[in-house]
Image (spheres, rainbow, N blue to C red):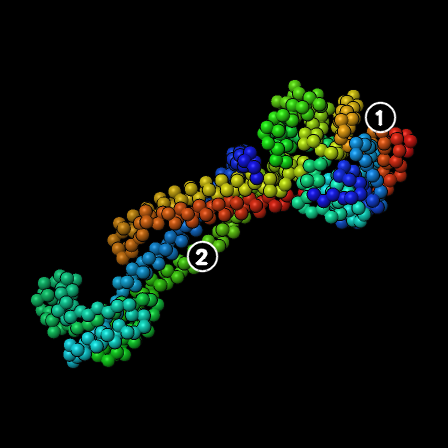
C-alpha cells in the first residue's frame, strides 16, 4: 500500500482538483478540500454542481484530470489497478437507490459483501449480528429486501457499508428514496456511526435535514467550493 | 486463495449453472455439436491415415526378373533394388510360388489345369516407405539391370486415392477444429455474458466493496469449466455411439470390404482426453472473454 506522507492514512485530501469528462463537460474546476479523520461532513449543492464527481473520484471510479486526490493513504493520481480494491475496502458506500440484491436475504446481502473481500465464514458469522444490531435490524436478518420498507432497506445499505469496517463512509443522497420521518432516523444512524469513530461524508440537498445537525457543510456550485462551515444556512 | 474461497467459488459456479438452466442447456448443446463435428472429422482423418499405413505396409511393386538371369544375377538384382531410396524391403518370389498364389486366387479348374510354371516369371515384391513416391521408386526399379522397361507393375491409382482421402480429411478436420473452436468460444462467451448481464448489479457491488477482479472472475471460470466438462462428457458418449454404429455399418456392407476401422476401444483414451481438453478450453475461454467487459468498473 502506498501511503502519502501528507495527511496520513485516514484523511481525505483534494488539492486543485479538476475534472473534465470526455464530452468536454467541466465537472470540477479546481477544488481544494480536506476531511480529517473522524469528521462528519455534508456535501451539498444543486444538481450538476460536481457532488457525484467527487464521490466517483473518492471511490476510484474515475481519475482527476489534474490536481491531487489522497484517500485514506492512497494517492489516486498514482494508484495502480491492483490497489483500487484496497482503496475501496477502506470506504463504505451508501447509495440513494440502496442497490441491494433482491434475491438475497438481509443476512446474505451482508455476507455477500464480506465474502467479496475474502472474509472467512467465522468472521462473517461474528460480524453480521453486531452490524445488524447497530442499525436496528437484528430481527430482519432472514427477510428479503422487497419485504422491507424504504427506510429499512437503506439501513441494510448502511449495514453493508459498515460490515467490512471501513475508515470512511460515503453516503450518496441516502435519504432521497426514504420518507421524511425515516430520513431523520437514517441521519441519526449515520451520526451514531460517526460517533463510533468512522469518518462520514454525506451528499445531500435536504437543507432542513442538514440544519438539524450541527455539522460541517461544504457547498458546491458549478464545480467550485463556494462555502465551507458549520450548518447549511451559514453558507 | 484460501480454502473457504475455493468452496465459495465452486458453490457459486454450480449455482450459476443451474440458476440459468436454459442458457446452460443451450451452451452445452452447441458445444456438444461443435465437439461432435470436430471429433467426427478427426476420426475420419485418423482412420484414413491408418488405412493408408496398412496399405503402405501391404502395397507392393512387382518387379519381374529377366528370364535370362541366372541365380547369382537374380540375387544381385534383388540387392540392387533393396539399395534404392524409399525401398523398405524386398521379397523374392519364385515362379512356382507365383503360380500357387495365382491358383489360390483363381479357383477356375480349367485355368488351373492349363497353367504351367513357365508362364510365370521370377519376381521381386518391393515394399516402400512412402506411397507418395511410388512412381519415382517404380522408375528406379525399372532402371535396375535385370529388370528392364515394362517389367514393373505398379498400381498408382489406389495409392493416389488413399493419399487424397487422407489429405482432404486431415485438412478439413484441421480447418474445422480451428473454426469450430473459435465459434464455440464465441457462443459460450455470449451465453455466459447473458448470465453475467443478469448479475451485473452483484458484480458492481462486489467491485464497490473492494473485491479483486480475480475473486469476481473465479465463479464464472468454474461455471465455464463445468459447462465445458459436461459438454465434453456428453459429446464423448455420443461420439462413441456414432463411431461404433458407423464402424458396424462399414463392416456389414459388402461394397466396403476394402475399408477397415480402428476399434473405438483402441482409441477412446486419446479421444476422451482431446474432448475433455477442448471442452474445458472452450468453457473457460468463453467465461474469461465474457467477464472481461464487466470487470471494467
Q: Nearer the viewer, residue B107 or A72?
A: A72
Judge the density around disc 2: few (<14), some (14-19), many (≥20) Cα neighbours within 10 Å.
some
Q: Mark 1 packing: few (<14 Cα in 10 Å), some, or many (20+)?
A: some
C-alpha gap between disc 1 and disc 2:
73 Å
Along the line of sight, the residue nearer the viewer: B32 or B90: B90
Query: Disc 1 on helix, strand or loop?
Result: loop
In the picture of the structure, the residue carrying the numbered disc 2 is B174
Task: Examine the rendered structure and indicate whether residue A82 appears above or below residue B77.
Answer: above
Left or right: B9 in relation to B297: left
Chain ID, mark 2? B
Looking at the rendered structure, whether the residues under marks 1 and 2 are on a common chain is answered as: no
Q: Residue at x 34, y 70 (%)?
A: B133
Quadrant position of residue A166? top right
Which image quarter: residue B241?
top left
Tell me if B112 is positioned left or right of B274 in this view. left
Which residue carries the number 1 mark? A213
Instruction: Classify residue B140 as left or right of residue A119.
Output: left
For the C terminus of chain B, the quadrant is top right
Q: Helix, strand or loop at disc 2? A: helix
Query: Where residue B249 is drawn, which disc sits there?
Result: none
Is residue A28 visible in the rendered image? The answer is no
Q: Nearer the viewer, residue A134 or A149?
A: A134
**Residue at 78% from the left image edge and 26% from the top image edge:** A195
Give the residue at x 14% y 62%: B104
- The x and y percentages for residue B294 are 63, 43
Label 1 is found on which chain of the structure?
A
Q: Position of residue B234 (x, y in %)?
A: 42, 41
Can you name the residue that lies furthest to the right here?
A: A234
Q: Position of residue B101 (x, y in %)?
A: 16, 64
**Which residue of the protein is positioned furthest toward the top in this rendering?**
A139
Amino acid at each position: 500500500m502506498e501511503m502519502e506522507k501528507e495527511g496520513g492514512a485516514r484523511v481525505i485530501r483534494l488539492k486543485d482538483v479538476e475534472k473534465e469528462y470526455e464530452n468536454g463537460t467541466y465537472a470540477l474546476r479546481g477544488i481544494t478540500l480536506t476531511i480529517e479523520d473522524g469528521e462528519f461532513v455534508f456535501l451539498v449543492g444543486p444538481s450538476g454542481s460536481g457532488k457525484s464527481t467527487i464521490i466517483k473520484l473518492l471511490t476510484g471510479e474515475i481519475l482527476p484530470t489534474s490536481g491531487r486526490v489522497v484517500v485514506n493513504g492512497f494517492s489516486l493520481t498514482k494508484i495502480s489497478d491492483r490497489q483500487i480494491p484496497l482503496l475501496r475496502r477502506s470506504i463504505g458506500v451508501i447509495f440513494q437507490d440502496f442497490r441491494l440484491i433482491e434475491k438475497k436475504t438481509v443476512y446474505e446481502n451482508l455476507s455477500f459483501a464480506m465474502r467479496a473481500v475474502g472474509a472467512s465464514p467465522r468472521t462473517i458469522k461474528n460480524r453480521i449480528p453486531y452490524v445488524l444490531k447497530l442499525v436496528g435490524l437484528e430481527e430482519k436478518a432472514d427477510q428479503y429486501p422487497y419485504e422491507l420498507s424504504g427506510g429499512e432497506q437503506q439501513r441494510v445499505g448502511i449495514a453493508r457499508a459498515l460490515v467490512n469496517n471501513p475508515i470512511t463512509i460515503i453516503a450518496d443522497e441516502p435519504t432521497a428514496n426514504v420518507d421524511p420521518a425515516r430520513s431523520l432516523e437514517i441521519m441519526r444512524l449515520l451520526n451514531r456511526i460517526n460517533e463510533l469513530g468512522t469518518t462520514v461524508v454525506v451528499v445531500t440537498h435536504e437543507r432542513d435535514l442538514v440544519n438539524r445537525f450541527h455539522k460541517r457543510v461544504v457547498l458546491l456550485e458549478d464545480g467550485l467550493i463556494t462555502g465551507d462551515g458549520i450548518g447549511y444556512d451559514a453558507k | 486463495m484460501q480454502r473457504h474461497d475455493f468452496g465459495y467459488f465452486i458453490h457459486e459456479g454450480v449455482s450459476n449453472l443451474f440458476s440459468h438452466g436454459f442458457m446452460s442447456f443451450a451452451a452445452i448443446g452447441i458445444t456438444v455439436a461443435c465437439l461432435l463435428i470436430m471429433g467426427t472429422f478427426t476420426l475420419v482423418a485418423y482412420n484414413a491415415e491408418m488405412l493408408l499405413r496398412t496399405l503402405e505396409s501391404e502395397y507392393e511393386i512387382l518387379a519381374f526378373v529377366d528370364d535370362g538371369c541366372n541365380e547369382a544375377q537374380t540375387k544381385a538384382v534383388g540387392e540392387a533394388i533393396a539399395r534404392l531410396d524409399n525401398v523398405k524391403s524386398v521379397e523374392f518370389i519364385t515362379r512356382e510360388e507365383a503360380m500357387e498364389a495365382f491358383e489360390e486366387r483363381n479357383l477356375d479348374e480349367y485355368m488351373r489345369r492349363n497353367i504351367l510354371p513357365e508362364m510365370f516369371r521370377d519376381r521381386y515384391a518391393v515394399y516402400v516407405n512412402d506411397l507418395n513416391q511410388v512412381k519415382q521408386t517404380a522408375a528406379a526399379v525399372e532402371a535396375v539391370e535385370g529388370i528392364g522397361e515394362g517389367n514393373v507393375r505398379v498400381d498408382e491409382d489406389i495409392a493416389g486415392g488413399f493419399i487424397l482421402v487422407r489429405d482432404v480429411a486431415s485438412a478439413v478436420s484441421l480447418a474445422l477444429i480451428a473454426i469450430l473452436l473459435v465459434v464455440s468460444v464465441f457462443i459460450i462467451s455470449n451465453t455466459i455474458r447473458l448470465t453475467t448481464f443478469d448479475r451485473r448489479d452483484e458484480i458492481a457491488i462486489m467491485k464497490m466493496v473492494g473485491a479483486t477482479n480475480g475473486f469476481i472472475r473465479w465463479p464464472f471460470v468454474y461455471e465455464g469449466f463445468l459447462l465445458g466438462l459436461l459438454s465434453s462428457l456428453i459429446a464423448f458418449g455420443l461420439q462413441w455411439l456414432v463411431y461404433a454404429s458407423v464402424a458396424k455399418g462399414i463392416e456389414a456392407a459388402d461394397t466396403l470390404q476394402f475399408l477397415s476401422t480402428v476399434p473405438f476401444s483402441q482409441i477412446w483414451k486419446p479421444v476422451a482426453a482431446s474432448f475433455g481438453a477442448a471442452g474445458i478450453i472452450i468453457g473457460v475461454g468463453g467465461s474469461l472473454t465474457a467477464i472481461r467487459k464487466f470487470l471494467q468498473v
